[in-house]
Amino acid sequence: IFSLTLTSSRGALHMLQVIMSVVTFIVSAIRSQPSHTYWIYCMVIWGLCPLLTLFITIIETLLIHKLILYMCMDWDDFTTGMAMMSSLTTFACAVVFGNFYAHIRSPWGLAMTILACITCVLYCIETFRDKRDSSRSATYVAALPGFLKVLEAFVSCIIYVSLIGYRGRPALYVCIVAYVIPFPIIPVIIVTNIFTKLKSCLPFNIDRLVLIFLIVSVLLYVLAAVLWPVYSFRDNPRPKHCPGNSCIWSIQFTVTFFTYLNLLFFILDLVFTCLGLCGFKKP
């Protein structure tokens, strides 16, 4: 059973993902950048993604996922959602290395960018295959409500690793608090909806709590969307020489952009929740 699982197209793809993630992690570690938050983010992603992929492969090899499916959760939905999350995060790593480290005089930076892109492509292939497979269910994470939560968490991570230039500015500390409050609640919502048995045993209606959470999140991000650009760019015009890979102004603009993007995601999530579209199924 073990060899059969690994030689299947899905098992082989998982092994390629694990190998490429590990190789990318090792090559990146050769020239560490411990003071650079973007580098730390990429190392965490390249460390977690293969572990998650290996965990899924072992569970499916031992057929434990059939027991999990029967007892508490939709395994297809979970694995498709994790593939989507891995695609997003590895894509961000490829963009980061392409922007910060890839240039002609740095063979290491070019090699890292290529490896990061290959790793991202492998996870995107799995996501595309899972979404195209009509036999796979999509109850939450791989459907609209859960995917919006994944996007919200992903964009929040990008904001965190991009935070800079806020020291000595109380208004920007308020923005950081606004960014931090919703983030830990998102995984709790995702996990609760994945474990359907747990959700049905709760003594309260979690959907109502999600609605309250989304309202609060929208208000917090509206506050951040007003304060961050005002207090980041007041009396702080864009420098004439401002390369995207080392300019504080440029990175602060990145935070502004992703603040508005996440605000859009939270608003869409709130609207769909209010309209009762949380039961959207994969077409």
Image (cartoon, grey):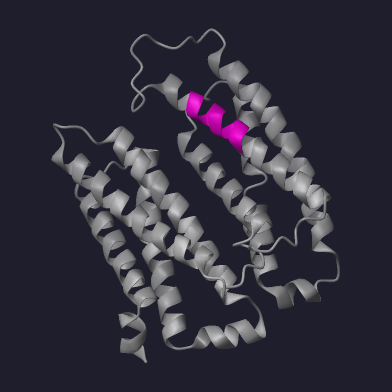
Q: In which quadrant is the C terminus drawn?
A: bottom right
Q: Is residue 28 left or right of residue 218?
A: left
Determine the residue positioned at 62% across, 17% down.
Answer: 230
Q: Is residue 281 left or right of residue 244?
A: right
Which residue occupies the foreground of this view, 274 or 161?
274
Task: Determine the image quadrant of residue 177.
Answer: top right
Q: Is residue 22 visible?
A: yes
Image height of 125 relative to 7, above or below:
above
Image height of 251 relative to 1, above or below:
above
Q: Which residues are magenta?
A: 253-261
> What x and y, as percent, mark residue 66?
56, 87
Which residue occupies the foreground of this view, 139 or 43?
139
Report the magenta stretch's main SS: helix
Q: In which quadrant is the N terminus drawn?
A: bottom left
Which residue occupies the foreground of this view, 135 or 150?
135
Task: Determine the image quadrant of residue 15.
Answer: bottom left
Which residue, as the protein is rendered here, is positioned at the far bottom? 1
Determine the residue positioned at 78% across, 44% down.
Answer: 271
Determine the residue positioned at 56% across, 76% down.
Answer: 135
Q: Is residue 41 visible?
A: no
Determine the residue positioned at 20% across, 41% down.
Answer: 110
> What x and y, as percent, mark residue 190?
65, 61
Q: Is residue 255 magenta?
A: yes
Q: How many marks?
A: 0
> What x and y, as percent, mark residue 44?
39, 54
> What x and y, as percent, mark residue 276?
82, 55
